[in-house]
Amino acid sequence: MARTGVGSLQDKGDAATESLAPAKGLTAIRDASDNLPPVHTMRALRRLTARAFTALALCLAFLFTFTAARAQTVTGQPPTTFTLPNGLAVVIIPDHRTPVVTQMIWYKVGSADETPGKSGLAHFLEHLMFKGTAKHPAGEFSQTVLRVGGEENAFTYFDYTGYYQRVPRDQLATMMAFEADRMTGLVLKDENVLPERDVVLEEYNMRVANNPDARLTEQIMAALYLNHPYGRPVIGWRHEIEKLTRKDALAFYKRFYAPNNATLVIAGDVDAQKIRPEIEKTFGQVPPQPAIPPVRIRPQEPLPVASRTVTLADPRVEQPMLRRYYLVPAATTAATGESPALDVLARLMGEGSNAYLYRALVVDKPLAVNTNASYQGTMVDPTQFTIAVAPKPGVSFAAVEQAIDGVIAHLAANPVPAEDLERVKTQLIAQAVYAQDSQTTLARWYGAGMTVGLSVDEIRTWPDRIRAVTAAQVREAAQRWLVKTRSVTGYLIKDTTPAHEEKRS
């Protein structure tokens, strides 16, 4: 969602306060660039600074791991689902605890669907979607949301772009009408497109150019994906963002924004039978785009045959960092049982003070300040298993890597102790259950999962698959996927080179 986002709930992104999973590891290690969550746009602040640039805060908590993305309620009623004649998939999740509803529209298009040379276009269009339509001028949609005390935001990721509003239930029909209108009615003019491009460039400066850790992640991803478009940053490469035009945005919009390329999720105080006619009346009138293929076909990675390393030196670095990314299957590309096993493996290695990496590098040996491991399963194509370590002062990267390799070798050679396996599985399932108090989180789970190709049943039964993970499956996952030839290791170091001084005549 690039792992970039907005700040507080009031700033339009409940990402920070309602993260889809508890943060894994220290926030000192786990920042907005780790595992690349969606790029969000802060609408309220943008309105206040429309003539200058918007300041977009980094979301440290929106860690969109597949752990959360696939987990659904264990005991609750399944959502109501149906598809309109124009192809729009609909998910309705009743929650009658408070008279509030969340509407999300998820488009099956993200940065990985951009034309080469046009990186950042999906995110750029996300910004432009707030510029108004023929029926509703720029700002009217957002002002309506604010006037009723609601919240809104948007986000872009490799595989999807999403827009959402959380409002009182009596405003849902109005929100649906607005969202259905801008699915095809967007109006763009150079006088508001070009300044918005400057907004995106300023966002790039803040998120990437001035963030050494984000720059390292950018370079690691480019090295991990030799052929697949996941190697391009979600926000784009700066030199390509600078050249994006109104024509580019409109062409992308007309190509991908259509009901047969979208999923509508409504969660909250609604009755599925009563709301369906309203959905049919609004979204059902939007014509489909017949040119959209039913399956996304992208260049795929060749078989990895060599490990790679990336070193980034920056004078602003105060804490050196080691990151290692492995190319692993996503839930949609994994064999049966592999994805849950990777979830469990990541938890065993990188969650809490009992995690194997933490024990080995922090407790047993004074090598690191902290450690983390995570698995990003909610993607269409092969994804990443990541390890992050902040070394202690004076500790070499070689010593850290040796310890990491030792943990992996032990996992690959020995069954996980039963008590560790059960502890981790219990934690994962409990985490999923406790997170369900948020209707927005539920909407995100279904929206993200269905957009990358998972069924409602697959999303809903994730806890059962976690329960079924065996020690043998965890060991096999470590043996098969956590191998050096499938990895890129990144080193973030402080650049101590003296600044070049110009000679004065």
Image (cartoon, rainbow, N blue to C red):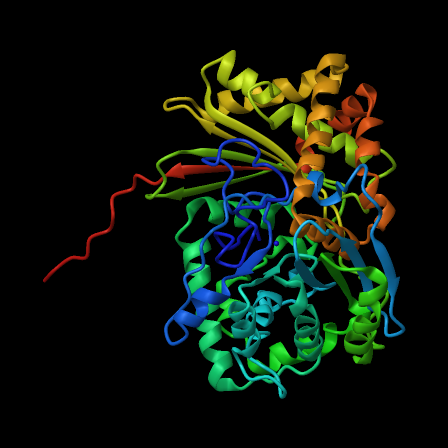
Q: Residue 336: where, in percent of width, then height?
A: 88, 36
Q: Residue 382: where, in percent of width, then height?
A: 74, 46
Residue with the most extreme right position: 85
Query: Residue at position x 48%, y 48% from top?
Result: 214
Residue 366 placement, left or right of 285: left
Figure label count: 0
Does residue 201 show up?
no
Quarter of the figure that contains the C terminus: bottom left
Q: Does 220 sit above or below residue 141? A: above
Q: Residue 462: where, in percent of width, then height?
A: 80, 38
Location of residue 424 (image quadrant): top right
Query: Residue at position x 54%, y 31% from top?
Result: 25
Quarter of the figure that contains the N terminus: bottom right
Q: Does 290 sit above or below residue 126? A: below
Query: Residue at position x 37%, y 24% from top?
Result: 393
Q: Does 211 sit above or below residue 147? A: above
Q: Residue 495: where, in percent of width, then height?
A: 34, 41
Residue 141 placement, left or right of 503: right
Does residue 475 show up?
yes
Query: Residue at position x 67%, y 30% from top?
Result: 346
Q: Residue 283 versus residue 207: which sits nearer the camera?
A: 283
Location of residue 74 (image quadrant): top right
Residue 248 placement, left or right of 4: right
Residue with the most extreme left position: 505
Q: Residue 328 versus residue 252: which sits nearer the camera?
A: 252
Q: Residue 219 versus residue 306: which sits nearer the camera?
A: 219
Q: Residue 402 versus residue 191: which sits nearer the camera?
A: 191
